[in-house]
Image (tube, helix red, strand yellow):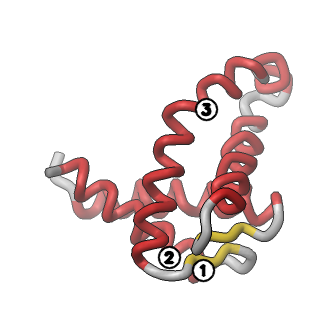
Amino acid sequence: MQLLLIWLLNAVALLATAYLLPGIHVAGFTAALVASLVIGLVNMLIRPVLVLLTLPITILTLGLFILVINGVLFYAVGHWLEGFEVQTLTAGVIGALGYSLLSWLLAALLLDK
């Protein structure tokens, strides 16, 4: 039950991110649900491999390259799905940061510990 609630909160966070940031567009709540599911799967399956492959650059930049990895994955999901669009890589980096902050804030406020 809690996993379903987290998924809904992530979809709401994605809608809020699209509303607040230019360059990110979501067609509706259904598109936000699908996009948040795909973003979660990409972060679970592809992101660890990319972090491992780019470990030297990540160490050199003191971990800031992980923001670029998150942005690239956010941008890629925006190009894979219809109804969810990320126009530029910069919008992807800023959108990924905003999306993670909003989903964390919603989860912290609404979920019991």
- Is label 2 in contact with label 3 (beta carbons under 8 Å)? no
Q: Nearer the viewer, residue 105 or 49?
A: 49
- First of labels 2, 3 by sequence position: 2
Mark 1 vs mark 3: in front: 3
* Residue hosting label 3: 46
The C terminus lies in which quarter of the figure? top left
* Residue hosting label 1: 20
- Is label 1 in contact with label 2 (beta carbons under 8 Å)? yes
**Residue at left offset 72%, top offset 56%:** 75
The span from disc 1 to disc 2 (Cα, nearest Å) is: 6 Å
Q: Is residue 81 left or right of residue 55?
A: left
What amino acid is at disc 2? Ala
Q: Position of residue 10 (x, y in %)?
A: 40, 60
Q: Position of residue 41 (x, y in %)?
A: 48, 42
What amino acid is at disc 1? Leu
**Residue at left offset 75%, top offset 48%:** 72
Which label is found at residue 3?
Answer: none
